[in-house]
Image (spheres, grey):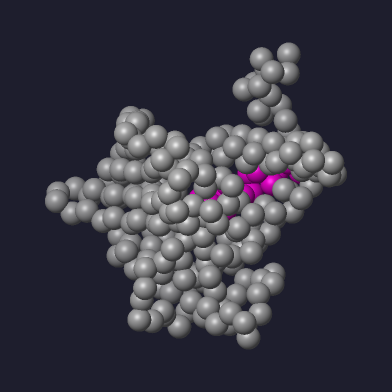
Amino acid sequence: MRTEILTQNDTEVKNQTQFEIAYRFNFPGPAQRELKVCLDSASLQIIRPQRESYPDWTKLERFRCPHCPLSATEHEYCPLALSLVEVIEKFHDAPSYQSVEIQVESPARNYWKYSSLQSGVSSILGIYMVSSGCPYMTKLKPMLYFHLPFASLEETQIRSLSMYLLSQYIVWKKGGTPDWEMNNLMNHYEDIRILNHSVSKKIANLEMMDTSINSLIILNNFADYVTFTIDEKILEEIEFYLKEFTG
């Protein structure tokens, strides 16, 4: 993968009230599609462009997950569904297996990769979902500060476990009770796994082509993988990368 460092430094990024991550998909020929996610720097909440209306399928009563804690009287729309609208509308007519050139611009650096469309859509879907305001996905917000496009299963595992354990160290330093066994993290990923299964089924019911559906399936595989690793304590899989620290 080729990376390019932007001229903007870290201090400038931190001082901004919002920042943007852009994904550009270059299809064979002159065709290009682009998605830009604008996030509030403090809350990491998505800043959605104004629309006159949203599809009926985005209403909470229609898109609710089986374990959703939100009240339909307080939330007319599912916050996660609102964030998926743009992605689904942009790629509903494109086959997921098509090879494209994907360019990613983030505040820290640029990325480039030639891969399947679903690989890029899956990567940006993670941003849309985590920043949507969904009470389950919001638990992964800290990872948005260090968004890594096209992350492998191992990279996702290391980032998730490392950031969570670092957060528990901070809890311990402040006199709190840390969750060294990562039980809460395991519960978070179980909630996300249920959510991803539910969302995948609901999107499939829209009878569109499979790009968005397959991309969500990839995200679900990430959730399953991390949950399985924590649950079974198979730390040997990652011990290789940490041997200089543990030896």
Visible residue check, residue 65: yes
Visible residue check, residue 118: no
* Residue 230 is inside the magenta segment: yes
Q: Position of residue 29 (x, y in %)?
A: 14, 49
Q: Residue furthest bottom?
A: 73
Q: Which quadrant is the N terminus positioned in?
A: top left
Task: Out of 171 and 37, give the one closest to the viewer.
Answer: 171
Determine whether, in the image, residue 198 is placed left or right of residue 95.
right
* Residue 235 is inside the magenta segment: no
Residue 15: quarter of image: top left
Q: Position of residue 104 (x, y in %)?
A: 34, 44
- Residue in the image at 35% along x and 56% along y: 36
Determine whether, in the image, residue 172 is placed left or right of residue 202.
right
Residue 6: quarter of image: top left
Q: Magenta residues, as a range? A: 217-231
User: Which SS type dominates the magenta stretch?
Assistant: helix
